Each structure stands twice: as structure tokens, then as C-alpha cells.
Image (spheres, grey):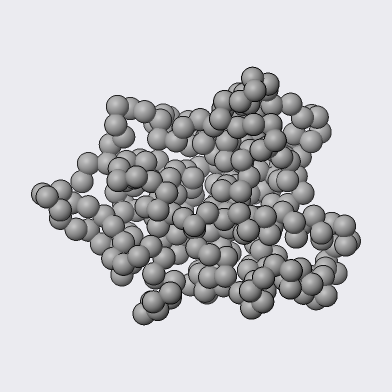
Amino acid sequence: MDISPDGGKTPLPSLSHQLSPAEVNMDLTMCGLLVERAEELARLYAEQGNWNEVKERWFDERLSNRSTRGSSQKIFRVLTSRFKNAPTTLPKPSLLPEVFEHCETARDKAQILYFYLVSDDTLVRYAVHEYSNRLAGEKSEPLDFSNETLQDVLNGLTYTDGSSFEYAESTTERWCEGLRSVMREIGVLEGQRTVTGYTPAVGTVPLLVAMDYSYETGDEDWITAPRGLLYLFQPEKRWEELFDRVASTDAWEYLELHGNLNLRPTEEPYAWIHPGSDS
């Protein structure tokens, strides 16, 4: 199966010149992945079915007692934004409790929640695109998430109106620490002081999500640039191994079509979340 990118193009387009200033925010300075709270919100949403009731429960239950009400309101707004704005290419938030039941580690859950963050937060997505393309350059150097390198990446962002990225230095530094906290949770960085990281190991459940997301997001040539794997900083040399891993599950399979070997879901994407269900 040929999975070579066509013409040596970068697998993920830079979002520079594609974003307007209004799309970019500093929400990451207030709220990282917060796996336990996000998991609790998903559980409440699966139970209640609408976000207004979830909000009432959020502030009525012990969750609001973990911080001041103002802080809790900010966290609620940011976390629910990631779920409310989730694309149809990711599992519905109401299904996340079932997805999490299959997870073996907190890192598995973090890697899944990471896709919702990247989909919702345009500045995080911009940075992920830039780092993914650096990784695609076949360099053996580790991924550098130091303030200096991150600031260099952010300074490369030019908005659609021609203006450039500009925030107060203290705010940008908090954003950089927020991104490093996310990288620690998904396994790219190890240790609180580490700023250089490597390709993370991916558990079976986040791999299934990454592959279904790649399949749903891409066109017929999605396999030459599987977005879910790229977002998890998986270099091309690892793709075949990951393809084989996912094909060893019941959710994906290799099929020979017109003399070519193709990899695709055995049923609909995400059918593995509730096998045997028509919904």
C-alpha cells in the first residue's frame, strides 16, 4: 500500500494567512485538558441531554467546590465550548462516557480529549499544524516546546487582514505553559520541567479515534495524510505499524480493491463504540 505524500508537500497546511484575529483566543491560559472535569462534563451531558441542565448540575454538585465560582464558570465555558463545537468527524460528546470505558489509562482519555481541543481552539490548531510539518521534515531532532521556540512559531502567524500575532508577553508565556501541559498529558513531554518531547505512544482506543477521525476528515487520499495521526505527532515511518495495529481490531480491515490494498472501517466510523447498535 503506497502511503507516500504526493509531491513532497507538507501533510498539513499552515493556517497562517487563513485565520482572522477574531478566531484566535487565549482560552488555553485558563483551561488545559482537565481530563477528570471534562470526563465528568461528558457524563453529565450523556445523562441530561442538554447543556443548560448540565450547567445547573455542574454548579450544584461538588465540581464547583473545587475552585471559586468565577474560575469554575470559566472552566465550564471553555470545556463545554470544545464539546459544543465538536465536528461530526469526532464522537458525539454524549458517547464519550462509553469511549472512556474502553480506555486503559488517563493518557488514553487525554489523547481523545486533545482532538476536541485542537478542533475548537484555532491557535492550538495552528501550532499543532506547524509542529506536525516540522516533524514531517524527517528531522531526527526532538520537538522543542520551549518558550523561545513556541514564540517563534506564534510570530509566524499572519492573519487574513495582514496583521500579526500580538499578545502581552506574560499572557503568551502562560499560553506556552498551557500548551506544554497538554503535551505532557498526551505523552509528548515527560516531567514538569521538560520542554523537549518525542512522538507519544498511542493506546488502542485513541488510535481508533485518530483513525476514524482521519478517515472522516480527509478525502479519498486521506491515507497519505491521516490527520488524526499527524495531530498526535506520528511520523510517516510509523504509519504502517499503526495501520497494521488498527487492522488487527474488529473495527478496521484491509480490503483489496482494483488490485490495490485499502484500509477502511469494517462498518461505519465509530461503530466500535456501541457494537451491534444501529445508532
Q: Say which residue appears at 57% left-offset and 70% top-offset.
A: 94
Looking at the picture, tell me which residue is in the foreground, 183 or 60: 60
Q: Quadrant of the C terminus?
A: bottom left
Looking at the picture, tell me which residue is in the foreground, 35 or 46: 46
> Residue 10: where, in percent of width, then height?
40, 30
Would residue 51 be visible to someone looking at this image?
Answer: yes
Q: Say which residue appears at 83% left-offset and 75% top-offset.
A: 60
Q: Say which residue appears at 68% left-offset and 21% top-offset.
A: 163
Q: To which quarter of the image does residue 52 belong? A: bottom right
> In this image, 23 relative to 139: left or right?
right
Q: Say which residue appears at 57% left-offset and 36% top-offset.
A: 126
Q: With respect to residue 82, does 167 lie above or below?
A: above
Looking at the picture, tell me which residue is in the foreground, 201 or 226: 226
> In this image, 48 relative to 76: left or right?
left
> Residue 231: where, in percent of width, then height?
49, 45
Q: To which quarter of the image does residue 157 belong? A: top right
Q: With respect to residue 219, does 10 lie above or below?
A: above
Would residue 202 be visible to someone looking at this image?
Answer: no
> In this image, 34 relative to 197: left or right?
right
> Residue 105: where, in percent of width, then height?
54, 66
Of all residues, the one furthest to the left in this rendering is 259
> Residue 269: where, in percent of width, then height?
38, 62
Of all residues, the one furthest to the top in this rendering is 162
Q: To which quarter of the image does residue 180 belong? A: top right
Number of numbered labels in the structure image: 0
